[in-house]
Image (cartoon, grey):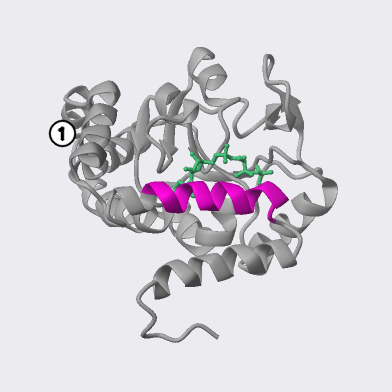
Amino acid sequence: MIPKNHPRYESLVLREKIKKAHDEGYLADSGMIAHGRGEAFDYLIGEETIAAAYEAIKTAVATFILAKNPVISVNGNSIALAIDDIINLSCVLNGKIEINLFYRTDKRVKKIKNLFKKRGIHVLGSNDDELLFIGGIESSRATASKNGTYSADLVLVSLEDGDRTEILVNSGKKVIAIDLNPLSRTAQMADITIVDNIIRAIPLMIEIAKEFKKKDDEYLKKIISNFSNEENLKRSLEYIKLK
Ligand code: PTJ
């Protein structure tokens, strides 16, 4: 039981969620380590959405709205922290949800699929789906649903190791990454990187999506054309250095 007045209450609650997901068998063992890395970077940005991230979020939402077949890719960590927000985002933005695991086992896939099923949501990427493979990815992350990632024009990835984003980008897909580490391979290779905690980024995306859905395409295209991921990542790094 974490006392509510503990100065690190929020952070400890997230740790509990990660631990629970591990106990329930759908979070990879390494997911604990990945969470710790995220915590460290979150500390460095002051555990708040910085201005650069806010801009990346706006660009990400504009790009998402203009996409034809967008997919939200989920893994053990993203589900443990943000399953309900991810479902809300997929509803607001009409995005499919697809399971994509680095440490893929039938057991983990089944458990994650059931978490969505309990909430009335059908997910792609399970063993019942028509699965294809994206060439050049050596890990299980190569798995791609025929109607999802394989044919998607946009993939939102989060809390991911770095073996997929570059290949997705090179195959012509737009990639939006949520990653607290601006130096990670995923962050560097994505088209749009949101350097923020998934637990803050997704609710903000939902809020902005509701507003942007009322805008015309020209408005959205202007936001996209004013954005440079390289510049944005530099701003995040500067923020960390100067803090
Ligand atoms: O569930 P699986 O099998 O797909 O495995 C997932 C893990 C997370 C184990 C795997 O993808 C992995 O090892 O990831 P990495 O290489 O540790 O990368 C995870 C990235 O997510 C790091 O750059 C972290 O800084 C970042 N991260 C961690 N927690 C958060 C985060 N980014 C945003 N919000 C967080 N809460």
Q: Which residue is mark 1?
A: 219
- Dividing the picture into quadrants, the one containing residue 51 is top left
- Tell me where residue 84 appears, x and y as whole percent: 50, 64
- The range drawn in magenta is 27-41
Amino acid at the residue labelled 1: Tyr
Badge 1 marks a residue whose secondary structure is helix
Looking at the image, residue 175 sits to the left or right of residue 150; the answer is left
Q: Is 68 placed above or below 79 here?
A: above
Residue closest to the eye, 219 or 25: 25
Q: Quadrant of the N terminus?
A: bottom right
Please name the residue shown 59% across and 62% down the image.
Answer: 18
- Tell me where residue 191 appears, x and y as whole percent: 38, 24
- Tell me where residue 187 appears, x and y as whole percent: 42, 30
Q: Is 157 placed above or below 2 here?
A: above
130 in magenta: no
Looking at the image, residue 86 sits to the left or right of residue 230; the answer is right
The extreme right residue here reads: 106
- Tell me where residue 13 appears, x and y as whole percent: 49, 72
Residue closest to the eye, 175 or 48: 48
Residue closest to the eye, 103 or 156: 103
Taking the image in four quarters, ligand 1 sits in the one at: top right
Residue 229 seen anywhere in this rendered image of the structure: yes
Please name the residue shown 29% across and 29% down the image.
Answer: 233
Please name the residue shown 58% across and 56% down the image.
Answer: 79
Looking at the image, residue 187 sits to the left or right of residue 46; the answer is right
- How would you classify the magenta stretch by its main secondary structure? helix
